[in-house]
Image: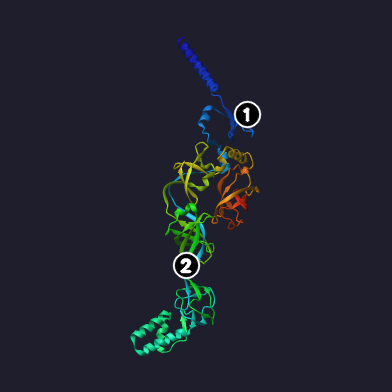
Amino acid sequence: MRKISILIIIAMTLIIGIFLGRCSEQSAKIQRKPLYWIDTMEPTIHYPGPGLSRMGMELTPVYPDQEQAEDQSTVRISPTIVNNLGVRIIPVQQGALARSIETVGYIEPNENKISHVHTYAEGWVRKLFVKAVGEPVKNGQVILQLYSPMLVNVQDEYLIALGSGNQALIDASYQRLQAFHISEQQIQQLKTTQKASQLIDIYPHQDGVVTMLNIREGMHVTPDTEMMSIVDLTNIWMIAQVFEDEANWVKIGESTEARISAFPGKVWKGVVEYVYPEVDAVTRTLKVRFRFNNPDELLKPNMYANITIIADSKPNVLSIPLEALIRSSEGDRVIVALDNGHFKVQPVTTGIESGEQVEILSGLKAGEKIVASGQFLIDSEASLDAGLQRMDSSSPAPSSGSAIIIQSKGIIKAVNRTKNSLTIQHESIPALSWPSMIMDFSVDKNVDLNNYKAGDHIIFKLGKDNKGNFVITEIKNISP
């Protein structure tokens, strides 16, 4: 009987414990009442009670403690949606930021390597050995022969001085021959033959090519006549413009690289030779001159070149890809990737831009994860809502190369002919739920960017390429 009594007591204790536990659980459930219900595929839409969403999905309750834990600037996206949006997440980098400037320039002759040919006495061109512009000449080559009575008389005076034996007179006559630029070779020939030459040889001052020919055989010339110009192309200039905000990066002596479309894969090395002192009032660019060696003379005047200026690196800075930055009239921001599918809009302060990277002065820490693609659809609730409806996994995915065409207006901020892209400050685009902002757009290869420049007001159309990315398919200039 005693054993039976003990078993009965233990059983009653278990029953009472289970009953009290269930009562406590029911009480907690009653106290923890959901605020609203959501479809995890559309977290921005709140439903008053349980059931199915407009998409036919089972609704999930949201309790007060869950909502308090949520930051107002934070959104939650399911992994399926993240995958459908093509969201790419990268860490914030800290280290040296290589400062390089990409620009386009054109080739000019080095003005320090240009020489002009004149005669030092009045006469007539008897023989011309250079017949056309573009012919190469060498230093020491006879390019023309001149008949000049004055130069014949000067030679006769020298012969008379030699015959007199008066050294002072000989020296004076010799110096006069030199003053008229009669070559040493012809002076020695005069001493040997003791006869004045009727034709005086004219030589170029340097190697090069003839860029201007202003005489023909039989023409009368004077010392004022510019007979021809010769340019040495073994050392040339390239002239380019850099944007005003990059002007302080460019220093004389810095290294540069040039690439010419006519010579794929070939790179020329040069230096910054001169930075012009004035910014263009219209384009807001600074003119820069570069010097390049051209021993093979492959580089021709007026050729276009893609130029990279390699400036000193800025050490120990935070940087992110430029594509991860969202710019608008309200300021710059990025999308920070948190844990468990959460994303947060984070305002940032930016510094210098270098190539595809931008410096972050405040708002981020090294190692934080940010969204590098798909961030525009996460940036606001409206964009998120529209993006989720378009990219929902239950809906058919849009095919690449879609015929969608969207038109907008904007102002060109920069033209990058190297990458065939434009930086545009565009108006809001309701069809994409994009606010007014500054963005980089790829441009279809059929659009000629040479017709456009920074500051142009334009109407442009967006289409999709074969990968489903938006590209500019048409551009038209309009009045401001």
**Does residue 351 lie above or below 274 as drawn?**
above
Which residue is at a point 36% across and 90% down the rendered structure image? 164
Q: What is the quadrant of residue 87 in the picture?
A: top right
Q: At numbered mark 1, what does the secondary structure look like: helix, strand or loop?
A: loop
Q: Name, please, the residue furthest toward the top.
A: 1
Say which mark, if any, is on residue 111: 2
Q: In this view, which residue lies farthest toward the right? A: 403
- Kindly indicate whether the residue at mark 2 contacts the one at mark 1 (C-beta within 8 angstroms): no
Q: Which residue is mark 1?
A: 51
Q: Residue at x 60, y 54 (%)?
A: 444
Q: Name which residue type carries label 2.
A: Glu
User: Is residue 327 or residue 341 the one in the foreground?
Assistant: 327
Along the viewing direction, whichever of 19 and 223 lies nearer the viewer: 223
Quadrant position of residue 167: bottom left
Toward the viewer: 308 or 94?
A: 308
Q: In 3D space, how far apart are the residues under numbered discs 1 and 2 (Cα atoms)?
A: 81 Å
Determine if residue 348 is in view. Answer: yes
Q: State the colouring used for the structure image.
A: rainbow
**In the image, residue 292 above or below residue 15:** below
- Give the foreground label among 1 and 2: 2
Mark 1 nearby-residue class (10 Å; few <14, some 14–19, many ≥20) = some
Give the mark nearer the N terminus: 1 vs 2: 1
